[in-house]
Image (tube, helix red, strand yellow):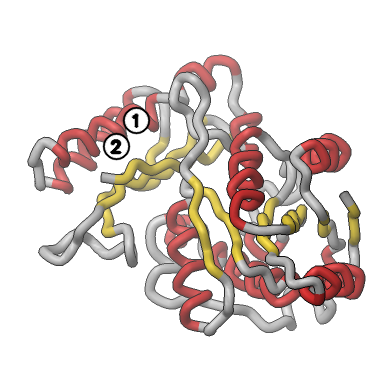
Amino acid sequence: METVDTRSRLRDQVAQWRLSGETVAFVPTMGNLHDGHLTLLAKAKDVADRVVASIFVNPLQFGPFEDYDQYPRTPDSDEQMLRDMGVDLLFAPRVKEMYPLGREQGTKVEVPGISDILCGLQRPGHFVGVATVVTKLFNLVQPDYAVFGEKDFQQLVIIRRMTLDLCLPVKVLGAPTHREADGLAMSSRNQYLSEQERAVAPVLYKALADVAQDIRDGRADYVDLCEWAAARLAESGFRPHYVEVRDTVDLRKPDADSKELVVMAAAQLGRARLIDNVRV
């Protein structure tokens, strides 16, 4: 595996593969890799000849009081995991490389309508940061495929919409949420949980799974179901930000045209902001 930190070296390597007729899959990450990331890389290897991964803790998607400075960074172990997975190229740029004109003056990308709801309502500007950096990375890597985890379901919907709307020639693939044995969705922020909080954390998934099962059983009183789930989380020690049932295509509230739904939630548990979802 080769590691590069500049746009020019990244483009040169990808151009060589293109000349050889090879396809490229891309997995963008913020590092601190865990087994959930490995499932994304495995999917990338399945669909393309070459795999590019990036590690970049994107400052533009963190709010002023969020955990950008504290976000766990483990570059040495990350590189080893990527190497063991057979990744061909790691792009690990500095902030200046990604934002040459600075974060404040640089061009930003916004996906209207679905960026300021749910997690976007709780984290203003977050998805502008996500859409901007992913657009930059897509332009740099120019992959045939890009793989994202379904745990960040709103992010996945936004990136798919952005890719379609900007006519980017990238097929965006989702990979199922990878979970611990007790159901907790794997996340770098799980490290923020104390031992006691870690024991409570799986309640988030269990509450969403129960709501999803009730919907499968025929219940359509979504507001009542979500209020019940939020109360269950609060009783367990969470501070629920939201529990919602939405359409999987565009995150609108369910209507007669909805063919598939997703039960989504975000909740604070100690220092950790946890998100999860269950599709119906």
Q: Residue at x 58, y 56 (%)?
A: 147
Q: Is residue 130 above or below residue 57?
A: below
Q: Are marks 1 and 2 in contact (CB under 8 Å)?
A: yes
Looking at the rendered structure, the kind of residue marked 1 is: Leu
Looking at the rendered structure, the kind of residue marked 2 is: Ala
Instruction: Identify the image quadrant of residue 194.
Output: top right
Counting from the top left corner in percent of width and height, residue 225 is at 18, 39
Tell me the residue that label 1 is attached to. 233
Helix, strand or loop for disc 1: helix
Residue 205 visible from this viewpoint: yes
Residue 73 visible from this viewpoint: no
Q: Residue at x 80, y 36 (%)?
A: 84
Q: Is residue 84 above or below residue 9?
A: above
In the shown orientation, is residue 115 left or right of residue 46?
A: left
Taking depth in this image into account, of 135 and 21 the one nearest to the observer is 21
Q: Which mark is residue 230?
A: 2
Counting from the top left corner in percent of width and height, residue 154 is at 44, 58
